[in-house]
Amino acid sequence: MMRFLLLFSRQGKLRLQKWFTPMSEREKKKIIRDMTTMVLARQPRSCNFLHWKDLKIIYKRYASLYFCLAIENQENELIALEVIHRYVELLDKYFGNVCELDIIFNFEKAYFILDEFLMGGEIQETSKQMVNRSMEASDMLQEDDISEWYEVELFG
Amino acid sequence: MYFYNVNELYRAMSPSVPLQEMIRAIRSARTQCEERGVIQRECAAIRAQFRQADNGGRSHNLAKLLYVHMLGYPAHFGQMECVRMIASPRYSEKRVGYLGAMMLLDEKQDASLLITNSIKNDLSHSNQYVQSLALCTLACMGSAEMCRDLAPEIDRLLRASNSYIKKKAALCAVHIVRKVHDLGELFVPAARSLLAEKNHGYIPSCMHSAVMCMCLCCVFQTVPDLVQIMKGLVLSGYSPEHDVAGISDPFLQVRILRLLRILGRNNEGASDAMNDLLAQVATNTDSTKTVGNAVLYETVLTVLDIKSESGLRVLAVNILGRFLLNNDRNIRYIAMTSLQKIVGTDHNAVQRHRGTIVDCLKDQDASVKRRALELSLALVSASNIRSMMKELLLFLSSCPAELKAHAASGIFNAAERYAPSQRWHIDTILHVLTTAGGDVRDETVPNLIQLITNASELHCYTVHKLYRALLSDISQQSLVQVACWCIGEYGDLLLRGECQETEAVQVTEDDVLDALETVLQSHMSSPATRGFALTATMKLSTRITDNVDRIRSIVSIYGSCIDVELQQRAVEYNALFKKYDHMRAAVLERMPVIEKNSSGHTNGESTGEAMKDIQPAKIKQGEPLLPPQPANQVCDLLDLLGGSDETLQPSPAVGAPAPGLLINTASIAGGDLLDLLGVLEPAPLAPAPTLPVYEKDGVTLTLSCEKQSDTGLTVTLTASNSTESDISSFTLQAAVPKSVQLHMKAPSGDYLPARGTAKVTQMVVLNNPNKVSPKMRVRISYTSRGSAFQDTVQIDSFPGLDAAGQ
């Protein structure tokens, strides 16, 4: 299973954190520190796999963001790389040519997309269209909800 | 100016300013301090908002708080708000509420229990997206308690809902089983039926649920089903929705392979059933793209983990071999990690790819290099040692610094195990010392010296080589130390000039002394090295003829050296020149061959040896019933069971017996070595009152004692047998507290005839210098009617003594 997924910028600022096992705040902070230091220190043309404690860390840089995924030791690293890539594709489809700013200003959407793709440390849905459809439907539901509220506000 | 802008911006904000404006404000803060200021104000506003009654901007406020939380600021005051939002009827609020729950609440927080009810309600909501929120949250942070509560709900959803929900419920079930293993059985039937369904959309998740359940139940009847599904994916069916670079749903394929791996692991039958499929996947999968390689990699991992036939294993190793040649360094890396895991079990198969592996030593990537080094060292064998060593030495000269120590020690180990000849071995070590001398371990120097002394025919060759190495470079300390040592020992061979193995070089005495002096004076030499050099110089005084005076002057100069160690040596050598000149030749002669000291020799063993060497005394009365115990346990003072029967009271040289040592009655017959009090009492007369201390199975033991002095006490134990059968091999053993010393005299006998017709007496002398309250534990052993008996009795008070034992 996957243990955690982190997104951070080249300056080490955290943009997204998803934890698939329960951990205290202190542990989370420590892990974030460790990951950012380790990954940012890597040479540009090195291997995308690292060992850390008893986990394998798979990281990949997309433009100004580092995607860092931790998996257990018996898992397949190559497919983990594909998981990262698939998530980026999903974000790209949703935001249209996604960039770091999209993820900063719409972080909750990034989480919602992630929650349609992965769950409990496992892959939930392997079809891109299905994930997109679910997101669209949920967003529409939310819109209806909000517009309802606006109407109430306007009328009184 | 800038600060003014930020303030203005903030003033323009209304309490329910949308999330994005706040983010902009935070991002535009130039310093950490400013940012903190903005965030503090925001948090205060958010807190105020939370306290108010239901207002439209609740989801925005919580979202803002979550953003602040991601930046690393405390957000625990939002936990209750999450709970409230989750209970809201509005989807937008639920959505953010659940997100907040996943970010701020975990099973360690008390507040997490409060959402259990909401989750329960939402699981049966009419809208599937609400259900999905609940399922997702449960799978993310559900505690064991929550899981137990909600498991039946999940099972219901697994059976009767649409495919979208089924898939999420299945993953939720996986989480539940992980948290509470027992609940696995609950989900088995539902998981089985999911496997039988044909739709792509949710098979991956149900697969995993099936994995967990099957792990618990070890059911491999699902193997044919899985094989079927997999075949379908690999051979036929192009589903554009699930296709990745020409491979049908690679995520699913990898999942299935993983499950097959678990099912086939120690199971012959299951492994057989999947053999064909694995071969098919291995040969048919396109390996030009990473996805294809991912599937192939999983196949290889599965093949190597189950009980596969050898042909399939060879196929798997060949795939790894192909991976080694791939351009993608990720793939080379994982190939090597996998090969490393199997190099022990499938050694021959991996050997076939040795060439490629050795080539990877030259790879650019440091991780790949490290893996290649490990693998290469594992592949060294007697047959390939020469060629492998060439490559390894080449690697050593150009490898990154962090790998040098590991490489050097690996090379030494390999050389030691497979060296084809001594000369080769010495050459190899010298090579390592010249290239990586700074990174070798400290034991290398004595090990090498020991090796050299053992290769007596090569002394001449070795010393020549080392001399030449010394001339070229004196920075590598290990090398210089060994060189100095050899020159000191075999200097005469060096000066003789001729050498069979290497070209002769004319070396004069002055040259040699020059070299040693250079080492002595160089700032690069460590104190240890200079010590070596000085000793070597001294040794040469018996091996050379003309320049002894030079040596004398060198040695006397160092008599006033600042380095204390060096000074001491020099002074001693000076003395050797002056007062003890007659001994000099003998002291400095050739050293004997050093025996290799086995590292397994521990102190424990040697003391054990020493103990065993103590001769057991002539045992007068029969064999003791107890088996001999190791000497170490004797120290357990009041533990009668730890007595060593062979250990006696120590020899007369020792003043008193070790306190509390368990003394066997079979002590030295007739000789009271340690008669502490000088009182020899042949007959155990006991005018003092007697006390029965033991009575069981017809055996009675009475005790009487008599004070001999302020600290001495004589105790007499009398045994009698009132049973109908005779008792033989009757022995008594005694133990006393630490501070009391004990000496047992020889018993009167060991035979107790039936019906009390005769008694056995045993006298025990106690010395109680610390005047503690004396206690004694006595063990009785005897044989009656063919069986052995044993018992223990503790005596806490002695008759005739007051409470304080006086």
Image: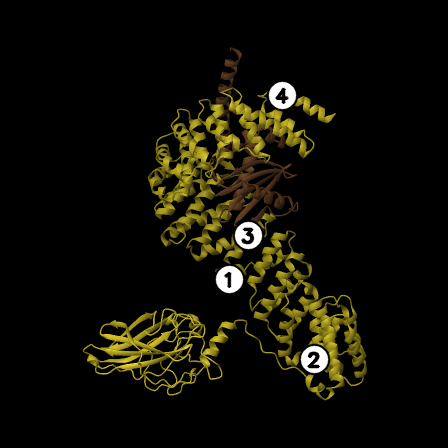
Q: Which badge, 3 or 1, is on the more N-terminal residue?
A: 3
| Residue type, label 3 | Ala
Element carrying mark 2? helix
Q: Using residue B495 as the reference point, say whether residue A102 is left or right of it.
A: left
Which callout, 3 or 1, points to the residue nearer the camera?
3
* Chain that is coloured brown in the picture: A
Asked if badge 3 and badge 1 are on a common chain, one would say: yes
> Of circles 2 and 1, which is in front?
2
Relative placement, left or right, of B343 versus B734 is right
Tell which circle, 3 or 2, labels the residue nearer the N-terminal end.
3
Q: Nearer the viewer, mark 3 or mark 2?
A: 2
Give the residue at x 66% y 71%: B427
Q: Residue furthest left?
A: B724
Residue B559 visible? The answer is yes
Q: Position of residue A130 (x, y in %)?
A: 48, 30
Q: Which residue is mark 3?
A: B335
Chain letter for yellow? B
